[in-house]
Image (spheres, coloured by chain):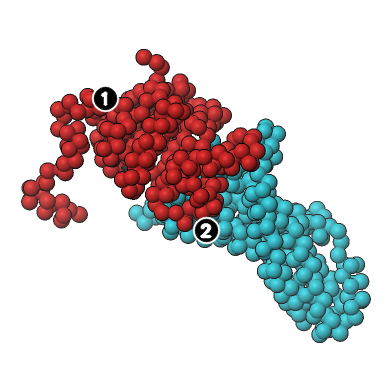
Chain colours: A red, B cyan
Amino acid sequence: MTEPIITVRDLHTSYGHRKILKGITLDIYPRETFVILGRSGCGKSTLLRHLVGLNKPDKGQILIKGIDMVTASEEEQNALLRKMGLLFQNGALFNSMTVGENVALPLMEHTPQESSTIRIMTRLKLGLVGLSGFENFMPSQLSGGMKKRAALARAITMDPDILLCDEPSAGLDPIVAAGIDQLILKLKTALRMTIVVVTHEMASVFMIADRICLLHDGEIKFLGTQAEMRQSKDPYVLQFIERRADDENLDPDQYLQDLMAE
Amino acid sequence: MTLRKTAGHSGRKLVLFFVHAARMSSLALQSLSWIFLAPFRGKPIRWGATFVQMVRIGVESVPIVSVISFCVGLIIAMQAAYQLERFGATIYVADLVGVSMCRELGPLITAIIIAGRSGSAIAAEIGTMKVSEELDALQTMALNPIGFLVAPRMIAMMVVVPCLTVIADFVGIAGGFVLAISNLKIAFIAYFNQTAEALLAKDFITGLVKSFFFAIIIAQVGAYQGFNVQGGAEGVGRSTTTSVVVSIFMVILADLMFTMLFYSTL
Ligand SMILES: Nc1ncnc2c1ncn2[C@@H]1O[C@H](COP(=O)(O)OP(=O)(O)OP(=O)(O)O)[C@@H](O)[C@H]1O
Ligand SMILES: [Mg+2]
């Protein structure tokens, strides 16, 4: 097989004394769509932040295109980052700029193009996410789902090699969510992007994923293709696929103790 | 026990003070390098954003700076006249107002107004961007928050605060004029000549030099407090308040140092 484009080796990380990731090792190959699953608060967003060098690991290695993100110089990091796009979970649009300026910003700062070219490219990207005609709106004038899509447009303005999406379809109606799935497939086939998606929508997982990774307790519980996931006998994986709630804890003494604990 | 607690507490405070001082100096060095070195390495200054900041910090502050300096000029003239009347030397009101405005009060008043008005705004803007992950977003776009946000604001401050100080000097002197002409019955031309004679170029220039450094302090403290925001909206509020208190404190300290320097040498 080809060289992996993203390599994570034994990644450990913590916030204060709380350990979040405890030894993540995975390879992501060029032009695959890699889905990260896991319960809320298990560290998916944290993992994405490490991939772009926003957080520094306690231990472990992160290689992007063979370059260590942790020890790379600022120039090397920036060169990599220009070819990466990250869609933040909350969008993280610049609130002081219009939607159009948000999407155009990376182009304006990194490419010597004419402003008319940049305007066309901005409209193109906004069109892709179904926001044509909104370039003069401020982020505060958009709905939650529209912000998400505007942020996605911003993440793909530079036509990145690697696109990282943190819950791209959370908070979207089923039609638009399906549209985002289609867009991800299109980006993968037409623009040959490597795409890492964090999502909770199992329907969308089975639509887009080449490989799936399930995080649990800071470790990888499962890593494999869709078919492998469907055949898995692991109770936790099954619980995830079947959308089953945790069995309720029926020990009344324990429950009472938890409530009364100092 | 309490003694040890107190010692531990103040020890921690002291360490924290040095940590802040070190981090702030590092931010200042980085900002200066983004302003003076980065343009030669193909990372141009964002003049558009700088201009917007100049308008916001400078042009929009002209009315408030003028009104306050005018009042201060009046106040000094009245206080000076109160003393000088006893010697029948009210003409020296012109000297007192002119020299104290240019050497001290013009720069200081401007700095305090700008710290409250614009230093706090810098802290709040950057702090809000930190809370909403906009700073992280900048970084993932390979844009450095210091080059992108701090440099334009700092350049704007360094240009605009000395300009405002000049305005404050003149308006303050005009305040003295008004009192002298209306209350002290001094002829316009006599007061004018007296002021012109009393004021030396160095009075004016030392004031401007000070105000340039005040500008750097205000911009740096605002930016530092912004980057330092922890938590959410209430963190932004806390940092904004702190930025005003700290920058006024540091401005006064710097003023003291400059005055000692100028007093002993010039
Ligand atoms: N800035 C922070 N400071 C301290 N703890 C944090 C911080 N950010 C996240 N955490 C903790 O790290 C853990 C993982 O957070 P993360 O945002 O990565 O979760 P997630 O898997 O993305 O969850 P979700 O699906 O709800 O978005 C959480 O338990 C959270 O409490
Ligand atoms: Mg998350």
Name the outermost residue toward the top: A1
Residue B69 x, y percent position in the rendering = 72, 70
The amino acid sitting under disc 2 is Thr
Q: Nearer the viewer, residue A4 or B73?
A: A4
* Image quarter of the N terminus of chain A: top left
Q: According to the image, label 1 marks what residue?
A: A224
For numbered disc 1, what is the local secondary structure?
A: strand
Res B100 → quadrant: bottom right
Q: Judge left or right: residue A94 versus residue A117.
A: left
Query: Would you call the spot at circle 1 few (<14 residues within 10 Å), some (14-19), or many (20 or more)?
Result: some
The number of numbered badges drawn on the structure is 2
Cα distance between the residues tagged 1 and 2: 49 Å
Taking the image as shown, residue A243 lies to the left or right of residue B59, namely: left
Position of residue A26 relative to residue B199, above or below, is above
Residue at position x 82%, y 60% in the image: B203
Residue B118 in the image: x percent, y percent?
A: 61, 59
Residue at image point 44% right, 54% down: A142
Above/below status of B86 relative to A22: below
Question: For residue A185, what is the image quadrant?
Answer: top left
Chain of the residue displaying label 1: A
Residue B225 appears in the picture as rendered: no
| Residue beneath disc 2 | B240
| Residue A84 percent across, percent down from the top left | 48, 32
Give the label on residue B109, or none.
Answer: none
Which chain's residue wears label 2? B
Label 2: few (<14), some (14–19) or many (≥20) C-alpha neighbours in 10 Å: many
Residue located at (34% from left, 29% from top): A34
Q: Is residue B265 something that shows in the picture?
A: yes
